[in-house]
Image: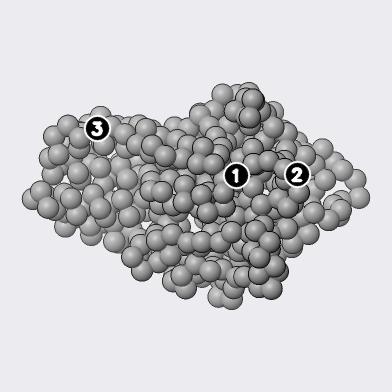
Amino acid sequence: MAGAKNQHAAAAAPARHASAAEPTDLKDQGIMRDIDLWAASRARAHTVLDRCSSSSVCLRLRSGAVLAALEHALALVDADDAPSSWLLLAQAHLAMGSVSAVRSACVAAAARGADIAQFSSELNTYLETWIDHPARLGFLFPEGAHREGRGERHSRLAARGLRHDGCYAATPAVSIAWSIFLDRGATGVPRGVVLYFHGNGENADFLQPLAHQFHQMALALMVVEFRGYGNSSRATPLLSTLCTDAEPLVLSDALDEALRQASLPKATPVICFGRSLGGHVAVHIAAIGGSLFANRVRPCALVLDSATASVRNWTRVAPPGSKAQGPPIPGGVSMVGLLENMQKLSGMTVPLLVLHGSADAIVPPFQAKLLYDASAAPEDSKHLLLFPGCGHNDLAHHPKYWPSVARFVEGTLAPLTQGR
């Protein structure tokens, strides 16, 4: 969740490890104590939603079948357009982690005569007193960590057609910037594009050295910058908008338009890649992009580097002895909702690669196991690798990191690109 100050700037340089210890597959390791503790707290947390009119949607939300609940709520809206159905849709969108969609559903419910006061009050309280609590935002988005974008090297690359920059509207007042890096030596179109969501303190300029690694795999790199970072609007970064700011990529034509500007085919396979805090966005976009209600981009794979399994684990992320940050995590529907990667992964069969350092003190490695176990992908298409001695910000320096990513990419894209 903290930014990688040194990881990517030297990604193409020789690895710093004297010995290339093999990354460890965590499937057979016994880091189960923390997982058992998490499962117990999860069981205690799921309560409410009884006032909703569809017990089917409520049960799906309680059981963690978030995508199924959302799709069922959408079907109810399509069937009768009743105020109660729109409120159900708002509940399901909250569970999905889409604040903008929650508010849209509330507006529709109010227009049909529904009393949304209680739900809106609960949502605002949740956002303002917990998810966007100043202490939490100060920890995740420290002052001075936001990086300006587009220096001299950007101008040189743009002039040669190797970098394309643009933006899309996340809200009427907030624009989100993106940059696509192309391979100067490529003779054909890329096999796919990596849709990269960065960690704290990073931006497209900072991550430019990664482009070479992905070009070696015949992939283009597209970096999406959070609000307050790089060339996105100078709005305050918020956890409640982290995922929803990226939704236009797959729920409108924002990604299609970005690919067009870079002269990439609309049908280019997309690999969602999230590092640290960006893992939440990558999971969210892969989930909604691959679900029934998104008819445009369908991500074909998901890679998570040093990602968090769930906001419910953040109370155990801080170093031993540190003071609590902000208020305790609430219960009820809030426990289903925002930034709950495990809930979303449980409804996804997209191929998954989870990469984590064994010495990560910011996001402990047990969370990588939680992500892996939550995924509904077949056993032969999900992979979990623990890199010995690596922390949170030096994972890409391990000599086996990029070969591991390349093998996963090849196994995922080969069936899709045969004959191209």
* Mark 1 closeness class: few <14, some 14–19, many ≥20 residues within 10 Å: many
Mark with earlier residue (1, 3): 3
Looking at the image, which is closer to me, 258 or 357? Answer: 258
Image coords of residue 221 (percent x, y): 63, 50
Image coords of residue 347 (percent x, y): 44, 32
Mark with earlier residue (2, 1): 1
Q: Quadrant of the N terminus?
A: bottom right
- Callout 2 amino acid: Gln
Label at residue 75: 3
* Mark 3 closeness class: few <14, some 14–19, many ≥20 residues within 10 Å: some
- Please report the residue visible at 59 percent of the width from the left and 59 percent of the height from the top: 164
Where, by quadrant of the figure, is residue 30 drawn? top right
Image coords of residue 414 (percent x, y): 66, 28
Q: Are dots 2 and 1 in contact, CB under 8 Å?
A: no
- Callout 1 amino acid: Val
Q: CA distance from mark 1 to mark 3?
A: 32 Å
Q: Which residue is mark 2?
A: 216
SS class, disc 2:
loop
Looking at the image, which is closer to me, 128 or 82? Answer: 82
Q: Decide if residue 250 is in sight here.
A: yes
Q: Decide if residue 391 is in sight here.
A: no
SS class, disc 3:
helix
**Image position of 402 (left or right of 219):** right
Q: Quadrant of the C terminus?
A: top right
Q: Which residue is mark 1?
A: 193
- Callout 3 amino acid: Ala
Q: Nearer the viewer, mark 3 or mark 2?
A: 2
